[in-house]
Image (tube, grey):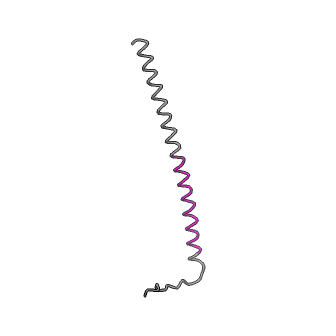
Amino acid sequence: MSNTKLEQRLADLEVKITHQNETIDTLNEAVINQWKEVDRLSRQVRLLSEQVLSIEDDGQPHEVTKPPHY
């Protein structure tokens, strides 16, 4: 194989690696953002669950009333 062909193949490989690195960085950023969102939503669910439990455990009976249109 001639030097020019080897140099061209090497250049092509370098371009591919550069694009792959950019893709990996983009995907990594997306994963980081998704984990942040999952963490935020998990905290929110935990807080809402605690609120529901505190309402259920307040010891007062909850009267079921009919809506005004009945």
For the C terminus, the image quarter is: bottom left
- Residue in the picture at 56% in, 62% down: 44
For the N terminus, the image quarter is: top left
Residue 32 point in image, percent of width and height: 54, 47
Number of numbered markers: 0
Instruction: Find out whether residue 40 is within the magenta segment.
Output: yes
Q: Is residue 25 above or below residue 65?
A: above
Residue 57 vs residue 14: left or right? right
Q: Main secondary structure of the magenta part?
A: helix
Residue 62 point in image, percent of width and height: 54, 83
Residue 56 vs residue 17: left or right? right
Instruction: Find out whether residue 12 is within the magenta segment.
Output: no
- Residue in the picture at 44% in, 24% down: 12
Q: Is residue 22 above or below residue 42?
A: above
Q: Is residue 40 above or below residue 7?
A: below
Which residue is most to the front? 69
Closer to the camera, 64 or 15? 15
Q: Is residue 4 above or below residue 19?
A: above
- Residue in the picture at 41% in, 16% down: 5
- Residue in the picture at 43% in, 14% down: 4
State which region is magenta.
Answer: 31-54
